[in-house]
Amino acid sequence: MSTVFRPDRGTYVRDHAWMAALAMAGAMGVLWAIGNPHVWTGAVAGLAAVGVRAWYLASEELGHEWRIEDGALHGPGGRHVPLDRIARLNTLGSAVQIVTEGGDKHLIKYLADRDAVRAAIRQAAGRDL
């Protein structure tokens, strides 16, 4: 039996909404700082950039799946992380970052409950990470 972790569409949308808000504010700030009289165009540009990115990558990102099986984490693109080689588990926003003893880093992104995923990996590894 395996435990499966899949991205959550609502979390994906929420994370991109935050990115859009930051991009909008940043672009407006840059335009203001350089004296552009059309500061509002930064908001349009920031929203458009993040919106296009979100739309373009949605099918790929929401299709990624991680699973715990046979003493390892198996992820998209043939990623394979033995549980006994995990050095640390970090949280970054809605993601769990896996850091191996060799320094490799992997992200399980857009999780509805990142803390539950982190706890499940810890439990499967049989140790505190």
Image (cartoon, grey):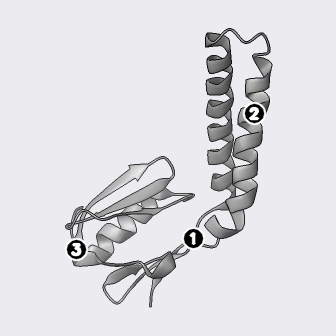
Q: Residues within 10 Å of mark 3 (few under 14, many from 20)?
A: some
Seen at 75% across and 27% down, the residue is 43
- Left or right: 45 as drawn, with respect to 71: right
Amino acid type at mark 2: Ala
Indicate the secondary structure of the residue bearing disc 3.
helix
Seen at 39% across and 51% down, the residue is 91
Marks 3 and 1 close (CB-CB < 8 Å):
no
Amino acid type at mark 3: Arg
Please say if 81 is above or below 8: below
x, y percent for residue 41: 79, 24
Q: Give the residue number, with chain letter if any, for mark 1.
A: 6
Q: First in sequence: mark 1 or mark 2?
A: 1
Q: CA distance from mark 1 to mark 2?
A: 31 Å
Marks 1 and 2 close (CB-CB < 8 Å):
no
Q: Give the residue number, with chain letter if any, for mark 2.
A: 45
Marks 2 and 3 close (CB-CB < 8 Å):
no
Q: CA distance from mark 2 to mark 3?
A: 43 Å
Indicate the secondary structure of the residue bearing disc 2.
helix
x, y percent for residue 92: 43, 48
x, y percent for residue 88: 26, 59
Q: Give the residue number, with chain letter if any, for mark 3.
A: 85
When asked about the image quadrant of residue 39, the answer is: top right
- Left or right: 109 as drawn, with respect to 48: left
Position of the C terminus, as image quadrant, is: bottom left
Between disc 2 and disc 3, the foreground one is: 2
